[in-house]
Image (tube, helix red, strand yellow):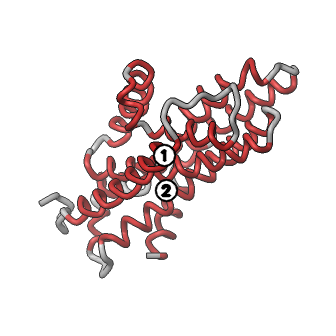
Amino acid sequence: MSTVAFITARGLFGRRRALLLLPLPILLVGLALLCRAYDVSPDQWGRAVIVGLGLTVVLPVVALIVGTGVLGSEVDDGTIVHILTKPLPRRDIILAKYAVAATVTTVVSAVPLFLTGLLAGSAKLGAALAVASLVGALAYSALFLLFSLLSRRPVLVGLVYILVWEGLLGNFVSGTKVLAVGQYVVTITDKIAPTTMIESSVGLTTALVMSAVFIVLGTIAAINRLGSFSLAGETS
């Protein structure tokens, strides 16, 4: 399992895709620094930068790039066959790749979100954002890893989920918020460090329970889906 995780991490950072992880976090911190440098009150930029960019764009997009990258390319080019021929349970393969995806997503998103919260004037807010991004990374990674096994266009499917389900429908159809990871992240942040810059739309219990549901069911579904792959790289 550790060998699979090492190979996955090496492959992830060895591709150009890894470079896509940098611009959004840099933009997030850069905007916060710019507002701080011009002495703009966090009440004026906090919601747009922290929620509108950080929690709504940076976290899910980073999770999408990483989550679909740890396995999707292997499915596309057929190299997944080499992994499946190894004497490893399918469960261990998925768990190793999920661990890499969740860890990388957490680090890449939590650090800039913490710095942004700190620049907004509160170490507590920064810590809350880091904790929330950890939960979000776990949930998003399970979902996007599953997408990479269900579709040949996992990035497109993931973007539809982020932009349409969480973005468009999440703002106008209240029922969709219960199935939106982004709402759980906002709620967790709001409950740890209440601020006028962040307003939650679902309860904390709902956020925690549904995050666990995404993590557990997404991982189990991914394990079952990988189990349906034959050695020819096709699904049975």
State the residue lying farthest toward the bottom. Answer: 87
Location of mark 1 (residue): 205
| Residue 84 as seen in the image, left or right of residue 43 | left
Look at 61% across and 34% down and name the residue there: 54
Please provide percent x and percent y for residue 1.
43, 76
Task: Specify the quadrant that holds the C terminus.
Answer: bottom left
In the rendered structure, find residue 101 and report the number of the disc placed on it: 2
Please provide percent x and percent y for residue 122.
80, 38
Please provide percent x and percent y for residue 185.
54, 40
Q: Is residue 125 visible?
A: yes
Query: Relative to 231, does residue 88 appear above or below in the rendering?
Result: below
Looking at the image, tell me whether mark 1 or mark 2 is earlier in sequence order. Answer: 2
Query: Relative to 98, does residue 165 appear above or below in the rendering?
Result: above
Look at 49% across and 63% down and name the residue there: 99
> Which residue occupies the foreground of this view, 6 or 90?
90
> Which residue occupies the foreground of this view, 64 or 119?
119
Query: Relative to 31, does residue 227 appear above or below in the rendering?
Result: below
Secondary structure of the residue carrying numbered label 1: helix
Q: Is residue 64 visible?
A: no
| Amino acid of disc 2 | Ala
Please provide percent x and percent y for residue 137.
52, 49
